Amino acid sequence: MDGDGADRGLNPDGTIAREGSLHRVDPVFAPVVAAARERVSALFGDALHGAYLYGSVPRGAARPGRSDLDLMVVLREPATDAGREAVRRLETALDGAFGQVDGVGVLVEDAAAILADPHDGGFFTACLCTPLLGSDLADRLPAYRPTSLLARETNGDLYLFPERWRAAADRGEEVRALVRRAARKTVRSAFTLVMPAWGGWTSDLERSARIVGRYHPEWADDLRRTAAAALDPVPDPGLLRMVTDGLAPRVAAQYRRVHGVKAPR
């Protein structure tokens, strides 16, 4: 159980520490990381400002055959449609070539947009992303603390998502992928809801669920199920309905009351 002495993910000055490192990548994932570095560099060349890993792989928490590989590519200029289509092909190629990952996701951003949005894209880049290639935008971003402002501007948009997830399910989107996406967003939002009170940062979804359960015991059981589904998703429509129609709307309503809603982007 997390106690007062548990690691809060902070630097000595109380700012949020960058959570990942290339040194933490499990050797089993080294080949896919090396291939991602090589292919991103070849694909974008001089247009690339930088590339980053995020998620469980650079935290050293990834599980072979069950975790996905998450990348962010940052360009010097906004991506073209052709560039985004090339990234989709890159995702498919990496996922098909390496059985140790269960899916590959690549975000495409541009440097100016990240710098212009310091409390969302900036925080994500500076604290949750691990540099892989090129320049590191963290050098041009502020330090971050676990404040209500940070909570609002990162996950204060949860109220928008349940309807989107239901619409995706109605369109026939693959249930397992939708469960993973909805579960991750909901648990992370629930954690940032209590983040200022707890006074720290973690991206560990199971730990996040335990922490939130101490502040909202009425959500504890559903949060545990949701965190488990985020880490090991199953094609369970009933679980998806529990998240989209129950847990996520309740968390979103409390978020509005405590932190307000995210500013329009």
Image (spheres, helix red, strand yellow):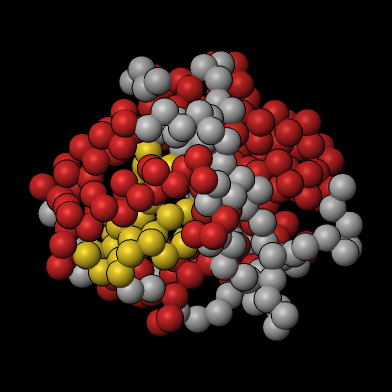
Q: Is residue 205 left or right of residue 124?
A: right
Vertical comparison of 61 with 174: above or below: below
Quarter of the rendering occupied by the C terminus: bottom left
Q: Position of residue 35 (x, y in %)?
A: 31, 46
Is residue 171 visible in the rendered image? The answer is yes
Q: Residue at x 26, y 69 (%)?
A: 49
Q: Residue at x 53, y 33 (%)?
A: 64
Compare residues 48 and 148 and report the one nearer the observer: 48
Q: Position of residue 131 (x, y in %)?
A: 42, 65
Compare residues 258 and 101 and report the one nearer the observer: 101
Compare residues 48 and 111 and report the one nearer the observer: 48
Q: Position of residue 82 (x, y in %)?
A: 10, 47
Vertical comparison of 18 with 171: above or below: below
Vertical comparison of 80 with 32: above or below: below
Q: Residue at x 55, y 46 (%)?
A: 26
Q: Position of residue 248 (x, y in %)?
A: 60, 38
Picture mark count: 0
Q: Residue at x 46, y 20 (%)?
A: 175
Quadrant in which residue 231 is drawn: top right
Q: Is residue 144 left or right of residue 222?
A: left
Is residue 247 visible in the rendered image? The answer is no
Q: Is residue 197 left or right of residue 166?
A: right
